[in-house]
Image: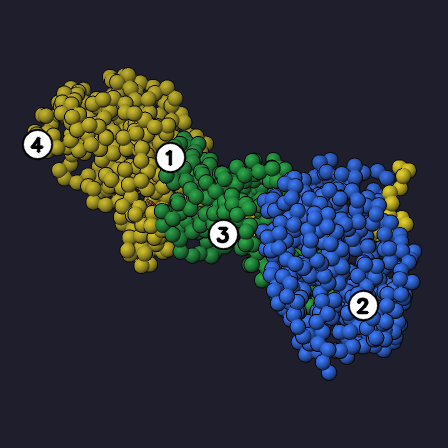
Amino acid sequence: MNNPYFDLLMFARGPLFDLALLVFVAGILIRIVEILVLGRKKDFSKAKGKPVQQGIKTIFTRTLPRPGAIKANPITIVGGYVFHIGFFIAFLLFVPHIALIEALTGLSWPGVGRVIIESATVIAVIAGLALLYTRWKDPVRRKLTTWVDYLVLILSLLPLITGYVAVNKLFGDPTFMMALHILSVDILMIVFPFTKLMHAFTFAMARYYNGSIQGRKGAES
Amino acid sequence: MSSSPLLPKMMKAHGVSRRSFLKYCASLTSLMALPPAMAPRIAHALETAPRPSVIWLSFQECTGCTEAITRSSAPSLEELIFDSISLDYHHTLQAASGYAAEQAREEAMKEHHGKYLVIVDGSIPLDEPGFSAIAGISNLDMLKETAEGAAAIVSVGTCAAYGGLPQANPNPTGAVAVSDIIKDKPIINVPGCPPIPMVMTAVLAHYLTFGIPDLDELGRPKAFFAESIHDRCYRRPFYDKGLFAESFDDAGARAGWCLYKLGCKGPTTKSVCATVKWNDSTSFPIEAGHGCLGCTEPDFWDNGGFYKPLSAPAGEYRRMGQAALVAGVAAGIGGGYLAKKNKAKAQADHETVDAFTLEKEESES
Amino acid sequence: MSATAERGVNALREQIDAPVASFFSSCVSCGLCADACIFFQETQDPQYTPIRKVELLRRVWENEYTLFGRVKSMLGLGNTITEEDFTEMERLVYDSCTMCGRCTMVCPVGNDITMMIRKMREGMSAAGHAPVELIGAAKRHTKGNSPMGDLSKAIQSQVKHAIADTGIDIEFDKAGVDYLVILSAQEIAEYPEVIGAMAQIFAKAGVTWTISSEAFEATNVGVQIGNRDVAKYLVTRVVEAAEKLGVKKVISPECGHAYQALRWEGPNLIGREYGFEVVHIIELLDQLRAEGKLKTSGKDTDKITFHDPCQINRRGGINKEPRRLLNMVAENFVETDDAGTMNWCCSAGGGVGANERAGDLKNAAFQLKKRQFEKVAPDKIVTMCAFCHHTLENALEDNDMDIEVAGLTEMMAEYLDDED
Ligand code: SF4
Ligand code: SF4
Ligand code: SF4
Ligand code: SF4
Ligand code: SF4
């Protein structure tokens, strides 16, 4: 006799995770290596500033918004921060997740308690919904957004929601909800390399290039 | 054995006071998650119920289940329950063997046709009848034959309930659970490897008093299999606080921190181990410092390793990851190379313009 | 598709490199770049969101520069470029972008959108979709020696005036001097006082310089159109003249895009380092100040504010220098909001000023500047780009604002210390 929920959980943890990992890792590498191989031409202009240093600096400094930006786009910026921070707290500081990362990479660090994890999750979900709302309502964002963008945002929220439901046994069989949680992560990993989720890796390159282009001229970035 | 002596007589014979009998009934009541008011009814039912005939079949098993049910401490209330039934066949326990034993079974089947209870421990091999047979009768035949006239079947142990250890990958005997073969009889699954003795006896008591209990989708009595170990685990506060033992002998383990990272399957395992406990309610595996193996769940042998955290991937992820690294870099270089070639071609095709050829050509080509 | 459109797609193809690929990979469609753009700010029209202006470049990248996009194209799912696409993009790429670089500063993932718009213009121009006025200017500059046509006579007479006004001799084509001065057509035609101003400052500071009678024009309409062939052709004139004269440095004048063209794009257009250095006039003045060779006396008591030309400050890195200089001569210097690196464009850079079709957009954009100036209410606006100077002067007049506009070099010359 089988427990179909358990089988689903094992499928999500087993073969599907393997496939997801393959697509995720290979896909991301393809996209990053592809960019790097493309390279850029040597710049013959005589540098005034320090392109490399400023490039590296910009990777970090661009994290902060320019003065006034928050007032103009509160939902996008505050929502964006909260979503990212909440997501990463829930993802990186929940011990079962650390156990997963440890299994994959051998790296491990201490986690935090459930109150923090769950508050972060709830707040991240609210922020994500707010981002979804402004994407839909704001004419600028609405015009920029493709159906894939909506999908990606929803797919990024699903692991948070299913994880919360599973851990708190809000509804459904907990094993089934846990299976759905892992399934949602598998799917997120699979779509990752094909969508804007790639920004999670390429943003550093983009910021570096921006900083180095401006830095060469001695301009701010 | 057909004349079933009623329970009070038996109790007296065993020197059990009425007081301790009622206490036992009360604890059964709470164990079965029934309202306390039900205790007298249970007592009454147990006292007046005729002892039904029970045939205990053991197939591909390790005797752990039988051991468990018999290893109960004195005063053996479990034993008492045994006496409230008529165990007509149990080839491990009975003195008779071979032809005589089988005759006892056949007699009981004939005499109590349609009323006897079958208890099974162990799984049934389907690949080859000869893998497991008793008195020349294959497990499959014996089960089918015996089940035919049964009122109900109780599958004790994960082997009988879900296939258990014999079914573990690669399942060399083609082992299956009772419920995979018998489809037309009520089956109560009491999984566990082995199940908690108190749970086994309580389920029998329930059967005797109220008939078939409420079962979950896996055929388990809801009274004992509704909550997960994790729901009731005394280490749960550590889990909630994010305090986890990293190895079996670290400070965290000594301080009693959560065993999740050491592979505890409590969160996905339904059983009352954390509340009813083992060995006369002395303790249970997690209390002894070891994570739950998930023994009341189907396929618990194959759920990714006993010492692997529940959240860790369970498949061939290491090989996959390495393959992905190599494939990703190679395909990336390939893709980059194609892109570079594309650009080189574009540059070779560059048509130099000047101010006078900047305007759009009017004639479409 | 026409042959020119084909040429346009090929030009876009040539423009894609790792930075572009990383930018498109990173864009999260957050729309934050919209608020940075003066055209969106003043129209609130979402089509002016900066990242939308590079859509065709994005398509080429996706279809031809990504493995996944190639597969998509092979399955017939690629989004190819049509002649109509080029036509549609004209208003976004040329009319509603001054190449000001503000979007590049705010994008949270760090996309240099302005640089990509510059690249978009390569495709647009090769496809034959550059604004006619800019093409006209390119023709005039190619045939003659400036986008305004042949200015040889004009420069000769302006230099003569300057000599007469200042009593300082200015020699054309003098070999062996340290500096070659080039000028923007705007200065030669509209603000020739700057020649005398430089002559006075340089005379005091002991700077030796000359003007080339062949290549005196600094502007480069090729950069504004976004066509590297044209830009290369025009910049080569200056490079050759400078190298022939053997000067150590070429002074890029008060002109934003000329500075971009000569200092930052030029070496890459010709594919080698120059045999000389390029220095912006304001950088040079600030250096002379630091060396004690530029001394002033007296100060302007007017309320003065400063307009940062996008190409010189935000995209050129010259931010503190003009402020140090201005503080020497202005008693009452007040900054506008967002002054410095995040200053708003004059509303007509990047070829918008010459583009008649963009007139309404330009006026709309100026309203932002107008509000900023009204808040400060200066008597005078100083800047360091003749084109900003020209734009502001005209726009202020059109908006009935009585504010004087001045060039910084001129202003420095005005308060030059006459002693010793
Ligand atoms: S369930 Fe476990 S204890 Fe019972 S027979 Fe099977 S292996 Fe043995
Ligand atoms: S030890 Fe196991 S059952 Fe107990 S809290 Fe930890 S994970 Fe849950
Ligand atoms: S703690 Fe888990 S593995 Fe241990 S007996 Fe209970 S259910 Fe089975
Ligand atoms: S460069 Fe300036 S004008 Fe052009 S799109 Fe960006 S912000 Fe707008
Ligand atoms: S600000 Fe950057 S990431 Fe956001 S839409 Fe514009 S280009 Fe994309």
Q: Nearer the viewer, mark 4 or mark 3?
A: 3
Q: Quadrant of residue C309?
A: bottom right
**Element under label 2?**
helix
Three-letter amino acid code at the position of disc 2 = Ile
**Looking at the rendered structure, which numbered label has been put on residue A170?**
1
The residue under the point 68% across, 46% down is C365
Residue appearing at x 89%, y 62% in the figure: C154
Query: Which chain identifier belongs to the blue chain?
Result: C
Q: Position of residue A151 (x, y in %)?
A: 56, 37
Kindly state the secondary structure of the residue where label 1 is placed. Answer: loop
- Quadrant placement of the C terminus of chain A: bottom right
Chain A's colour? green
- Indicate yes or no: mark 1 CB to ligand 2 under 8 Å: no
Q: Residue at x 49, y 52 (%)?
A: A104
Give the x, y percent position of residue A65. 55, 53
Query: Disc 2 designates what residue?
Result: C195
Res. B125 in view: no
C310, B220: nearer the viewer:
C310
Q: Nearer the viewer, residue B53 or A121?
A: A121
Colour used to depict chain B in the structure image = yellow
Front of the two marks 2 and 4: 2
Residue type pointed to by label 1: Leu
Task: Check disc 4 and report the residue beneath it.
Answer: B19
Q: Quadrant of the image for the N terminus of chain A?
A: top left
Would residue A151 be found to the left or right of residue C200 on screen?
left
* Mark 2, other Cα within 10 Å: few <14 / some 14–19 / many ≥20: many
The residue located at (91%, 58%) in the rendering is C150
Chain of the residue that carries numbered disc 4 in the rendered image: B
Q: Which residue is mark 3?
A: A104
